Image (cartoon, rainbow, N blue to C red):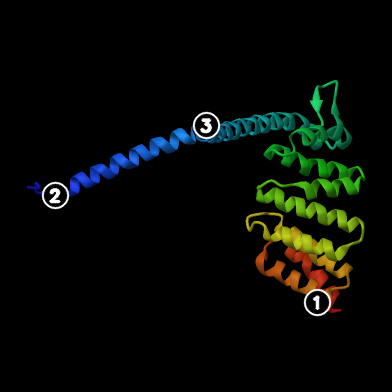
Amino acid sequence: MLEKRKKISKKQIKEDKLVTTYYEAITFYQKYQSKILIGIAAVALVVVAIVLYSNKKASDNLVAANLLGKVMPLYEAENFKEAIDGQKTGNIAGLKEIVDKYGSTNQGNVAKIFLGDCYAMTGNNDEAYKMYDDYSGSNPLFKATALAGKAACLEVKKEFDKAADLYKDASKISKENPSNSEFLLKAGIDLIQAGKKSEAKTVFETLKKDYKNSTEAYESDRYLIQIES
């Protein structure tokens, strides 16, 4: 006589599935063990590379800051040629060297602004524009300064229309920038030079509305009179 089959409980079914899954996982691992280990090693290498890269960037930024601190007295004393090239006797690296070696760091980007100023002050307008244009830092004041620097370079070439646009862009970077009123005044003047009096009037009116207590706002009155006469 056939014995009555025992009913399999839900618990047993669950345990059986767990055991099956476990052995499937073991089999999968054994089959693809080398590839899995290579993948883990690759991820580990990427993590290590990121950490090392971040550490090097931080280290380079610190070096650039120290070098920039040493050369800035030459810039502030308006010894622009020496600020560009440095002083071998004083063991001072020039702004050009700092930019060449550390231009991708935050402080290296700051050096680009000052190097652009030095080039502009020594008559090298094209190199000045290149430095301002190459600025890729995140500081809003330096961003605006870079745009204004490019505008000044275009003014030398009498490209007043483009210069005005850059000055206007510079004034929009940060509301806290104390140079905004100056940027707008220069934008308006350039628009007059470009023969765009209507646009110039709009810029001057914006200047008077947004920065009514600034020196530039009062100065814009004579340009408005000039436009309307």
159 on left or right of 220 = right
Quadrant assignment, res 185: bottom right
In percent of the image, x 74 and y 34: which residue is there? 102
Q: Position of residue 229 (x, y in %)?
A: 86, 79
Question: Does residue 211 sit above or below 123 in this rendering?
Answer: below
Crowding near pointer 1: few (<14 within 10 Å), some, many (20+)? few
* Residue at mark 2: 7
| Front one among 190 and 58 | 58
Q: Is residue 218 above or below residue 15?
A: below
Q: x, y (%) of residue 224? A: 80, 73
Q: Name, please, the residue furthest toward the front.
A: 1
Tell me, for residue 103, which label it has, or none: none
222 shown above or below 64 = below
As drawn, the residue found furthest toward the bottom would be 229
Instruction: Identify residue type, mark 2.
Output: Lys
Q: Amino acid at mark 3?
A: Ser
Q: Nearer the viewer, mark 2 or mark 1?
A: 2
Q: Considering depth in this image, is 19 or 139 the residue closer to the camera? A: 19
Decide: few, some or many residues near mark 2? Use Cα within 10 Å; few <14, some 14-19, many ≥20.
few
| Residue under numbered circle 3 | 34
Residue in the picture at 80% in, 71% down: 200
Helix, strand or loop status at disc 2: loop
Calculate the distance from the C-alpha at mark 3 to the C-alpha at mark 1.
72 Å
- Which badge, 3 or 1, is on the more N-terminal residue? 3
Residue 115 or residue 11, whichever sits in front: 11
Please indicate whether residue 213 sits to the left or right of residue 21 in the image: right
Marked residue nearer the N-terminal end (3 or 2): 2
Q: SS at mark 3?
A: helix
> Which residue is under mark 1?
198
Residue drawn at (85%, 26%) of the image: 87
